[in-house]
Image: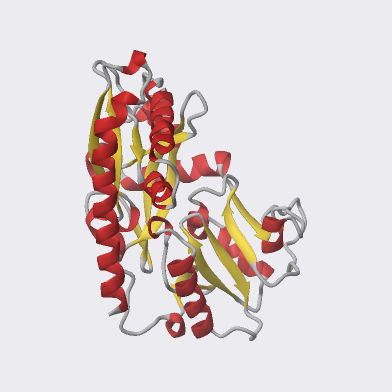
Amino acid sequence: EKETGAAERGRQEMLEEKIFAEGAAREMKDYLAPEFSDVECTVVEQKKNNNVVLAGICFHRAGQQTAPVVYVGQFYDAVKNGEPKEEVLKEIARQAEKGIGIKEIPEAGNVAEYGKAKESLSVRIVNTRANQQRLSHMPHRELEDLSLTLAVCFPLDDGMGSGSIEVSDEMMGVWGMEEEALFRQAWENMERDQPPMLQDMGAMFGVADSANLLAENGNPLEKPKGLMFVLTNRGMSYGACAIAFPGVMEKVSRMFPEGFYILPSSVHEVLIVPKDGELAPKELGNLVREVNQREVSREEVLSDRVYEYDRERGRICQVPESVERGRAMER
C-alpha cells in the first residue's frame, strides 16, 4: 500500500509540474530578452533514469543545431515554497538565454561520426529492472541486478556545464562498431579522464585525509583505517560504475582481506564497508532502502540491495540477507 501511495503521489507531482511548465511556456516571451523574440517555447517530457519522467520547456530557434531544455521541477518547488512566480520565471528565462547562446554542439558531442565521439565515451551504471524499456534499445552489460551502459559526454561552452548523449543500438549501428570495442574504448577514456577513487568517508566532510587509496605509488596496498569508504570517480559524477572498473575490486579486496560490503549510495558513488561483524547484511539493506527513500532523488537511485565481492569468481554479487523479500526496485 505504501508503494502504491508513493507511485500515485509521484504521478500527481509529474502532472502538476507539467501544468506549471505549460503555463510558464505561455508566459516566457514576456521574460526573454528582445533579441530572443523569435525563440519558440514548447513543453516536453523526457524519460530519464529509473523511468523518471521530467517536464521541461524547450527553447528552439530556427536554424540552430541546439535547443536547450530547462526542466521545471526545482522551479515548481520554489513557487510551492513561496518564492514569487515572477522571480522564478525570470530565472528560467536567464538559464534558457545562456543555453540558446550555444549555437552548435561541440565536436565531441557529434555522435554521427565515431571518430569524433570515441574519445568522449564513458560508462554508466543503472538498475536493470527500473530501466528495462530503455535498456532494450541500448548496448549494455548486466552485472547482477544492474546494467552498465554507455554515454558520450562533452563540455558545453559559456559555463553551461556538460552534456551527454546515451549510446543507442541505432547509434552503434551507424558507427559500425561492436559493443565490446565500445566498452573497451570507454574504460580507456575513463582511466585517462575520470579514474576511480577510494576515499575515507570523512574526507567528504573535511575530517580525514582525501588521498586516493587506490593509488599504490609502488607500495603494497595496506588496509586503511576507517569504518566506511566512498568509491567513485575523480569527478564524482556517475562514479558508481567504478565497481566494474577493470582491476578496482581486486585492489579493494587486497585492502580488506576479511571482505567488504558494497552499499549503492546513488548512481554517483557506492560505499565500501569492511566486514567487521558490527553491522549485519539485513541492517545494511534496511539502511540502503531508507536512504534511497529519504535522501536520494528517484532519478539517482541505483539499487536497494547490498553487494559483496566474490574473490573466486572475480565479480560482485548480491548479499541474499540484504534483500527485502516480496519487493524489488521498480520505480
253 or 40, nearer to the observer: 40
Is residue 253 visible in the rendered image? The answer is yes
Q: Residue at x 25, y 60 (%)?
A: 11
* Numbered disc total: 0
Quadrant occupied by the N terminus: bottom left
56 or 80, nearer to the observer: 80
222 or 238, nearer to the observer: 238
Quadrant occupied by the C terminus: bottom left
Q: Residue at x 34, y 70 (%)?
A: 329
Is residue 153 visible in the rendered image? The answer is no
Position of residue 27 relative to residue 4, above or below, is: above
Q: Position of residue 140 (x, y in %)?
A: 32, 53
Q: Position of residue 58 (x, y in %)?
A: 28, 32
Position of residue 180 relative to residue 318, above or below, is: above
Way the structure is coloured: secondary structure
Q: Specify the quadrant of the image occupied by residue 205.
A: bottom right
Position of residue 167 relative to residue 42, above or below, is: below
Q: Position of residue 190 (x, y in %)?
A: 52, 43
Q: Residue at x 61, y 61 (%)?
A: 230
Q: Residue at x 52, y 83 (%)?
A: 283
Q: Is residue 218 left or right of residue 129?
A: right
Q: Specify the quadrant of the image occupied by residue 325.
A: bottom left
Q: Position of residue 304 (x, y in %)?
A: 42, 71
Position of residue 190 relative to residue 230, above or below, is: above
Q: Residue furthest top?
A: 35
